[in-house]
Image (cartoon, helix red, strand yellow):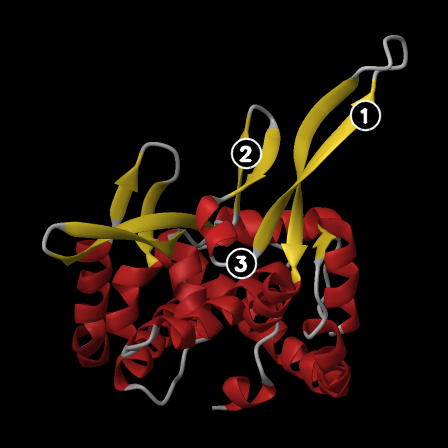
Amino acid sequence: MSEVQSISPFERQLDELKIITLTDGEVWSARDLMPYAGYEQWRNWEKAIGRAIASVNASGLNANDHFVGVSKLIETGKGARREIEDLEITRYGAYILFQNADGSKPEVAAAQQYFAVKTREAEISPRATPTGAELLALAVIEAQAMLTAKDAQIAELTPRAAAWDDIASSDGDYSVGDAAKMLQRAGIETGRDRLFDTLRVFGWVYRQSGRLQAAQRAVDAGYLRHKAQSHRHPETDVIVLDPPQVRVTAKGIERLRVKMLPSVLSLTG
């Protein structure tokens, strides 16, 4: 009992930070969770998020259901505000995220201890059908097994990273399908449709009038571009403008590689 009580503050912190939305119910901001995990820099926290997304996908679930890219406005001084990238994360997503964070940090270790206790409670529970936190704890067991398999896969794919420099240093932009093929050469399991889903999770694209559009912040960052398209009307021979095509720049492909394939060192550290 004392072990559960010693880590109960973490559960209280989750309750204090949760956001209630009309569409997804309880979610958490990745930015809000970051300091409670002992992280100071978003780029390091992003690596843990990338591992968590890979873990969820490897378990057979859809990470898009648990990690949704959004934007967040922050105060920058003198009344000015700036838009930054963020993610809305479900309770299950938050649990998996902390399992993939740096366990050497006391904050992460406390959270992982909490999950371990909940997992043990679920294992010894006499109830046939676990619910609530116990069900999530069992999911963590499965995700950990999948992550072990993912570690072995990443170790196998590491030599391919040496060939990536030639791709990342190229100029121009590429269709999402071609970008997916280039990422596959870097050892990332993806495809055209799956990469579109990933871009939506990262908040790089959004759907408008039934079509995916590049988010302005992704364009401003140099990750995506819009390419004008047109065709000649078969009867009038008039040029007709088509919806612009979303294109991924070389800089964007490199950014995707970093976000989608964490380094071996970051996994072992």
Q: Give the labeled residue for mark 3.
A: 222
Residue 10 position (above or below residue 220): below
Classify mark 1: residues with Cα within 10 Å, few (<14), some (14-19) or many (20+): few
Please name the residue shown 44% across and 58% down the image: 93
Label 1 sits on what residue type?
His
Mark 2, Cα crowd under 10 Å, few <14 / some 14-19 / many 20+, is few
Earlier residue among tags 2 and 1: 2
Question: What's the residue at 76%, 65% (across, down)?
Answer: 182
Residue located at (74% from left, 50% from top): 175
Q: Nearer the viewer, mark 2 or mark 1?
A: 1
Mark 3: secondary structure: loop
Count of residue discs: 3
Disc 1/disc 3 C-alpha distance (Å)? 27 Å
Residue closer to the observer: 171 or 120: 171
Q: Where's residue 161, x and y in %? A: 71, 82
Where does label 2 land, which residue? Answer: 207
Q: Between marks 2 and 1, how big is the CA–CA gap? A: 23 Å
Residue 120 in view: no
In the image, 112 versus 65, the foreground residue is 65
Q: CA distance from mark 3 to mark 2?
A: 20 Å
- Residue flagged by tag 3: what amino acid is it? Gly
Position in image of residue 230 (x %, y %): 76, 28
Left or right: residue 119 compared with residue 65: left
Which residue is at the far top? Answer: 235
Which residue is labeled 1 in the image? 231
Q: Quadrant of residue 16?
A: bottom left
Which numbered dot is residue 53? Answer: none
Spot the residue most to the left: 78
